[in-house]
Amino acid sequence: MFKLAFILAALAVSCSATASNTYFLYTLENKHNPEILDPRVPLSRYSHFKITDNTVILVHGHHGHATNDFNTMIKNAILDHQTPHNVIVVDWSTEANQGYASARQAVPLVAEHLANFTNWLEYEARLIRSTLHLVGFDLGAHIVGQTGRRLDQGFGRIGRITGLDPSASRWGSNSGRLADTDAMYVEVIHTDITGPTANGIGTPIGDINFFVNGGSNQPGCFTHICSHNRAFEVFAASMVNNGLLGYPCSSDLQNTLDRCRGDPLHMGAWFFLKLDLKNTA
């Protein structure tokens, strides 16, 4: 079992011409054959989107694409083990598969495109913004953060953001990185935070921050990329495993020495499920 530790307007339907996002819709009825959503077309044209179901949006990271392990693993875990969902996979692979500096520079444009798309989705489906859940891995964590920030312009914040080992390189404190103010609830899962070539941010930037196995050197991993990818693997596992618990730490030393104590908190989907039950009670 993994051990974890935590530290406690106007509708815009046109998208930036400089970003090339594509939006793939999956539901239980079309789990393997997505519909491509186009905000220039009424949502009613798409047969699989369910207005009454929850909606989660997935955003991959550097070198990612629509059918990589991050998207496939989490999409399948949600559809197989959670309440009915519309799962929307954001493909920004044209920018993501450039060099890191170019991909990082594209983050604000991709976020602008996604914010405009989300505005269209809210308008067409009459969605309540507080029910939306955005999940981003690596650079995608900063994209969903900046998307939430753009949407919070007098119309209220989105409900949830999950940041999966947010990319660290060139994402200092004044960089526009994911922050705890970007949604009503921001959860961050850290898995690769130490070492000169580590991928993830070690700073607790969310409302709740899970440092899986201390945040580094994941069991069975011998490379940073393996530990980095564990962030989306454990998040997908949380859809079926309610034993992924975090315990509060008051310092990094407590975390390092495995001395975190206090009331545990479920990581990922099980905590979200509790929120859903509470909100519908």
Image (tube, rainbow, N blue to C red):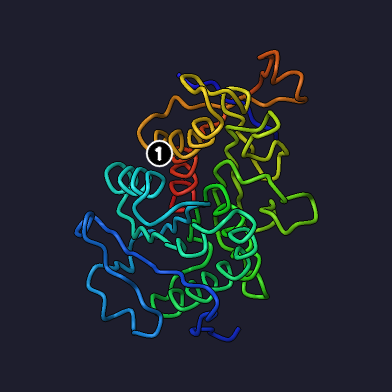
Residue at x-position 40% and y-position 69%: 22
For label 1, the residue is 236
- The 10 Å Cα crowd at callout 1, few under 14, some 14 to 19, many 20 or more, is many
Residue in the foreground of this view, choosing between 222 and 3:
222
Query: Looking at the rendering, in which quadrant would you find the N terminus?
Result: top left
Residue at x-position 69% and y-position 54%: 177
Residue in the foreground of this view, choosing between 186 and 212:
212
Residue at x-position 65% and y-position 58%: 182
Q: Is residue 5 left or right of residue 231?
A: right
Q: Amino acid at mark 1?
A: Ala
Residue at x-position 38% and y-position 38%: 239
Question: Total number of numbered labels?
Answer: 1
Outermost residue toward the right in this view: 174
Q: Is residue 1 left or right of residue 32?
A: right
Q: Is residue 197 left or right of residue 133?
A: right
The picture places residue 21, in percent across and down from the top left corner, at: 45, 69
The picture places residue 216, in percent across and down from the top left corner, at: 61, 26
The picture places residue 120, in percent across and down from the top left corner, at: 46, 78
Outermost residue toward the front in this view: 99
Residue 30 against residue 127 in the figure, above or below: above
The picture places residue 14, in percent across and down from the top left corner, at: 50, 85
Which element is circle 1 on?
Answer: helix
